[in-house]
Image (cartoon, rainbow, N blue to C red):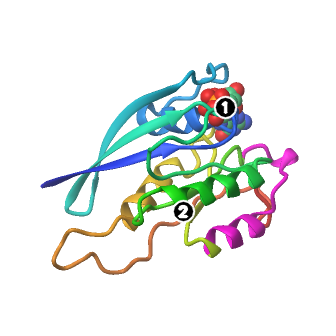
Amino acid sequence: MALRELKVCLLGDTGVGKSSIVWRFVEDSFDPNINPTIGASFMTKTVQYQNELHKFLIWDTAGQERISSCSPFFVLQETFSTLKNWVKELRQHGPPNIVVAIAGNKCDLIDVREVMERDAKDYADSIHAIFVETSAKNAININELFIEISRRIPSTDANPPSGGKGFKLRRQPSEPKRSCC
Ligand SMILES: Nc1nc2c(ncn2[C@@H]2O[C@H](COP(=O)(O)OP(=O)(O)OP(=O)(O)O)[C@@H](O)[C@H]2O)c(=O)[nH]1
């Protein structure tokens, strides 16, 4: 089975949950007292996607730091306007085939939502980015987020995978349908 390495870089304001998303994805754990990232940290996880193995090389940056030369990624919250600045920088300085994914994290915090899901989704669509509401705390859509990244990476097959239907996002039963964090 072919092994592909996918370089992922998490960007976003401090405290939005970048490290927690990585921990949930790689270790399937959540630490409510997780320390802020100093500089950057690096973790990997390999998953099977169709007839390939995808090894995610994940750089988790500190929220206070500016983007360096790393590739894809995301975050969003009250930080929606900051997110748009990240995307501008990625478009200007990132590689042309970059896959951008926006994670509306902490969607378990229903009462303090600030960004409407429709607005976030419309913005993501306008820049051809993945948009997923996630909760690192409750393990909502974390794996699905990375699966969707795998799906968006151009196939190396002569016969690319068909369908393109992606995955079914899970939603908390009590969650309002039209807003996100
Ligand atoms: N309720 C809730 N809290 C979360 C979630 N994800 C992260 N947190 C909490 O938010 C706080 C910040 O999480 P981090 O993962 O350190 O955030 P970060 O974006 O990596 O922060 P920096 O390292 O400073 O850039 C911690 O107290 C986490 O426990 C989530 O999905 N839901």
Whether 113 is among the magenta residues is yes
In the rendered structure, find residue 64 and report the number of the disc placed on it: 1
Kind of residue at disc 1: Gln
Examine the image and state in which quarter residue 70 appears: top left
Position in image of residue 35 (x %, y %): 62, 19
Position in image of residue 158 (x %, y %): 15, 77
Disc 2 is placed on an element classified as: helix
Residue bearing the label numbered 2: 91
Q: Label 1 vs label 2: CA separation?
A: 20 Å
Residue shown at 54% from the left, 62% from the top:
91
Q: Is residue 66 left or right of residue 148?
A: right
Whether 37 is among the magenta residues is no
Kind of residue at disc 2: Arg
Residue 130 vs 31, above or below: the answer is: below
Callout 1: CB less than 8 Å from ligand 1:
yes
Toward the viewer: 30 or 105?
105
Residue shown at 44% from the left, 53% from the top:
146
Disc 1 is placed on an element classified as: loop
Q: Residue furthest left?
A: 1
Toward the viewer: 129 or 107?
129
